[in-house]
Image: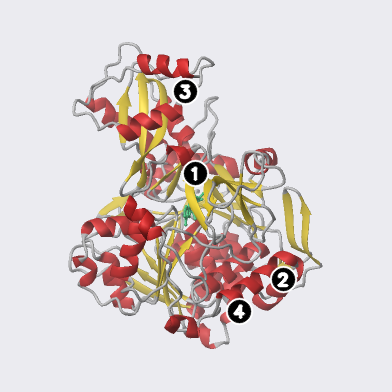
Amino acid sequence: MSQTDKSAPNIESVLHEARVFPPPKAFARGAHLKSLAQYRQLYRESIQAPERFWGRQAKDELVWFRPWKKVLRWNEPFAKWFVGGRLNVCYNCLDRHLGTPTANRAALVWEGEPAAPGKPGEERVLTYQQLHREVCQFANVLKRNGIAKGDRVIIYLPMVPEAAIAMLACARIGAVHSVVFGGFSAQSVADRICDSQAKLVITADGGFRRGSVVQLKKNVDEALGLRDASGDRLAKSVQRVIVLRRAGNDIHIEEDRDVWWHRELEYVGAHCPAAQLESEHPLFILYTSGSTGKPKGVLHTTAGYLLAARMTTRYVFDLRETDVYWCTADVGWVTGHSYVVYGPLANGTTSLMYEGAPNFPEPDRFWRIVEKYGVTVLYTAPTAIRAFMKWGEDWPRKHDLSSLRLLGTVGEPINPEAWIWYHRVIGAKRCPIVDTWWQTETGNIMITPLPGATPTKPGSATLPFFGVLPEVVDDQGNPVPRGTGGKLVIRRPWPSMLRGIWGDPQRYREVYWSEIKHSYFTGDGCRQDPDGYFWIVGRIDDVLNVAGHRIGTAEVESALVSNSKVAEAAVVGRPDELKGQALVAFVTLKTDVHATPELRGELRDHVAKEIGPVAKPDDIRFAEALPKTRSGKIMRRLLKQIAAGTEIKGDTTTLEDFSVLARLSQAEE
Ligand code: 7RM
């Protein structure tokens, strides 16, 4: 589908694509893997003898309270890994480092958002020893507030160390966390509470974003009051709210329900044994957008997820003892789970957390931080890189970036021009780039170069990680010849695969395991080049990728039609130079409602309120009617072409007239 929708690549892209960057010799010398042959040998084993391979890795990499009996029990589409084993993720991230030299190493280095230009942000460093203590204390706070093994906890916090502390504390006692990104609305919080039946919400009075305060607690208050169509409170499962003092803004405190984080700490000790959990004990639920309906609660469990988080972080980022590793993602996304918190900590690495935006107060914010802390590994999104390109080379040039040795990208396809810029300007042509493909559902990185071993090509995520068997297939599931586009599927279960959709096994089967027989369907289009390298084209379902954020068109459409002035809405993606894709909404209005520029703003705000600012349409276009097929289906392909092709009209009240187009297209049918 979308392969044909994409405009043809320009000649410059094609030339860049043909370039191959071998792993720099100096880099390969100290790397975990030193040659492509070494990678291929390990990869071959991981595919030919997966149970032997994973069994060995699990033994070497993790600390177990009790060994497993069986590596994999596969009852398609349900997997159980390391059956019978017991362990604890928090123990593997913290306790295992105590009594080793890592205990006194910085686990988290945190930089808060700066108040103004020239003013440094607040900063905090927690060693493994200190983080362990804080996590144990907070785990005791959770228990004190009625949380036990298996209970669900919503975490709705800014990017502060307490977000990681809260996640680890849940993992320590076997509570299941569900982190909600701070950019989501009260309605989204309520929906997630309702779906997960969470007992507790952990939030902050507010968070800082570009100099203003995000009213997190206020959103929680609102979420807890929202009702569904039959008048039932959506979030009635919540018994307690723990509030972190962060922004110092005035908030409402509900007696008997809300407690302050810092006050709670006064009642607890620092001793809290890590629960001995089954390998398949739920670790977290993370909601993500799909092509239909409300976001799905993607479920990840203990052992397989942890093993893959630890291994991918070490191999892909080629971790070394001296690293200061910085993944710029928010913990509200899966990248923050696996590559800010669990992966780096499981390896005893120093993980940097930054609260603010890349361009506040000035566009050199990232480069200032790299210089200040001597960041060695930087992992960010293509959309950020394209913004840096636009802001110009002078900003990074003002800083000493010589500590960097490896760069990574994730979240969307990176265009070769952005890759080359990142390589030249940020990496001084010295740092390898790892373009890592994966999803919320896959839990960890799936297709990626391994620096030191894999020659890279700008725009390609290159080759699969150990144990991952991806294939590009046609609609029947047959592999397509190299060079041909098709659907990207994964043929085998892997340790960190999602275990299901929370509370909906049927939907899990339908969404991921029905499109192509006996395969996990990723939703992405892809092609393999003659060297077997994977080139991800992007989503082929109705999921958009806007600035690296996953947004379901159906969700935005239902948010729009929930406004009383809207009759119908269709949302499509339009290629955007900076964000990868932009959201375009075609809207028809109820009788007697007039299309005005004000209404456009009103509808954008309405979507922000319903879902969150991340889902605000970039462009709203009013139409008399939406083009439909005779069977009544909205002609999305047509709308995509229109959205991509036409300039935004100066006259904001113009109504599109699709009647002619629709008739033409029907004639073609
Ligand atoms: C980690 C994350 C998943 C979707 C996925 C793709 C796209 C992610 C890449 C990429 C091309 C990449 N999880 N995607 N990484 N496309 N190259 N390196 O982003 O669940 O939020 O999104 O993102 O379409 O299906 S996610």
Question: Taking 652 as reference, is 40 left or right?
Answer: right
Asked if marks 3 and 2 touch (Cβ < 8 Å), the reply is no
Q: Along the polypeptide, which appears first: circle 3 or circle 2? A: 2
Q: Nearer the viewer, residue 116 or 407?
A: 407
Mark 2: amino acid? Phe
Asked if marks 1 and 3 touch (Cβ < 8 Å), the reply is no
Q: CA distance from mark 4 to mark 3?
A: 55 Å
**Helix, strand or loop under label 1:** strand
Q: CA distance from mark 2 to mark 1?
A: 32 Å
Q: CA distance from mark 1 to mark 3?
A: 19 Å
Q: Along the polypeptide, which appears first: circle 2 or circle 1? A: 2
Q: Residues within 10 Å of mark 4 (few under 14, many from 20)?
A: some
Q: Nearer the viewer, residue 404 or 471?
A: 471
Task: Name the residue tied to disc 3.
Answer: 634
Q: CA distance from mark 4 to mark 2?
A: 23 Å
Q: Nearer the viewer, mark 4 or mark 3?
A: 3
Task: Name the residue tied to disc 4.
Answer: 96
Task: Name the residue tied to disc 2.
Answer: 53
x, y (%) of residue 343? 54, 68
Q: CA distance from mark 3 to mark 2?
A: 48 Å
In the rendered image, the residue lying farthest to the right is: 69
Q: Along the polypeptide, which appears first: circle 1 or circle 4? A: 4
The dot on residue 539 is 1
Mark 4: amino acid? Arg
x, y (%) of residue 468? 63, 60
Q: Nearer the viewer, residue 456 or 367?
A: 456
